[in-house]
Amino acid sequence: MNIRIAYRAAIAAATAAALVSLSACGGDDEATATPSTFSVAGVEVVKDQKLHDLLPEKIKKAGEVRVATDVPYPPFEMFLKEGEPALTGLDYDLGQAIGAKLGVRFRFAPQKFDGIVPAIQAGKFDAAMSAITDNKERQKVVDFVDYSQSGSGILVAEGNPAKVTTLDDLCGRKAAVQTATNQLDLLKEHQAVCTKAGKGRIDIQTFPKDSDAQLALRSGKVVAQVLTKPAAGWVAKTADGGKTFDLAEDPAAPGGYNASPNGIAVSKDLPQLTDAIQQALQALIDDGNLVHIFNKYGVASIAIKEATRNAAVD
């Protein structure tokens, strides 16, 4: 199944309801002046001249980094208002914060996901921020600065009445999942663990759409739903004003189960830009602003603690 299509379907309704209250400070069509500060999630990011000096001359001269993104893909990238070009989302906010640190604007432009890397190779974009999984195959043609680890997560009812924290807590109980997804495979693979522990197999309830699975969770027919962790966090944050669901946090899997690194893809022709972005990201980690941005979208636990480069090992 196309994971990005399934992901979009999972949280479309929640996204529409939440954008008014969670909008970023401005959109893609805002003033062209180079930023010296950027306010997001209650914090202000200020230009660091030393980091600005690391940039390639062509980026300094242009005053911007051209960034490709596949919109919408909540909570990473969304249109602020349907039918209008202004953007919001985790990637957009993070891009503007990095840009503010560097003293240049991150100029986002929509691009179909499968065309993002080829567009960078062709020189149409300098970089891309679109919840892109860092892997060895992509590393052959772009460099990654990794900013999150994300995998599968567990959505539970508000207050977590069933006391579900880990996959083991689903053994012998009913759990919802969308058909033909990685999350269904995850639950099937965990059956052996449940059996070995003598806890009984997970009673897996499959649904054609994640919204159907969430309806089952709302009505108490299941104790949890397993879906991508960013989607789970976003739904918990936004559905009914955040009053219906919670995100279960397994301390042994902060990024989610089978988590993989997501990175900012940068042209291999711009190694200085990669260096500058990596150091700017690390500065946001060190001053605590990265966590503030991720928390705005309900997924603080997937934020990395060190800005790594090309972290994927397979």
Image (cartoon, grey):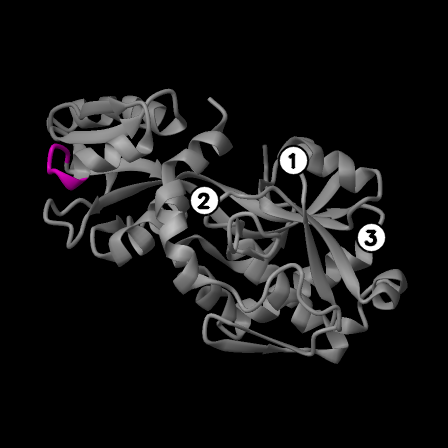
Distance from the alpha carbon under mark 1 to that under mark 3 = 22 Å
Mark nearest the camera among 2 and 1 is 1
Dot 3 corresponds to which residue? 270
Dot 1 corresponds to which residue? 112
Corner quadrant of residue 217:
top left
Earlier-in-chain disc, 2 versus 3 = 2
Distance from the alpha carbon under mark 2 to that under mark 1 = 21 Å
Residue 181 placement (x, y as % from top left): 39, 25
Residues in magenta, as a range = 218-222
Q: Amino acid at mark 2?
A: Ser
Label total for image = 3
Look at 24% across and 37% down and name the residue there: 214
In the rendered structure, the answer to whether residue 280 lies left or right of residue 77 reads right
In the rendered structure, the answer to whether residue 14 lies left or right of residue 223 reads right
Q: Evaluate if marks 2 and 3 touch, with contact meaning CB atoms under 8 Å apart.
A: no
Q: Amino acid at mark 3?
A: Leu
Q: Residue 83 colored magenta?
A: no
Q: Is residue 168 visible?
A: no
Q: Is residue 174 visible?
A: yes
**Mark 2 burial class by Cα count in 10 Å: few <14, some 14-19, many 20+:** many
Q: Residue 219 colored magenta?
A: yes
Could you tell me which quadrant the C terminus lies in? Answer: top right
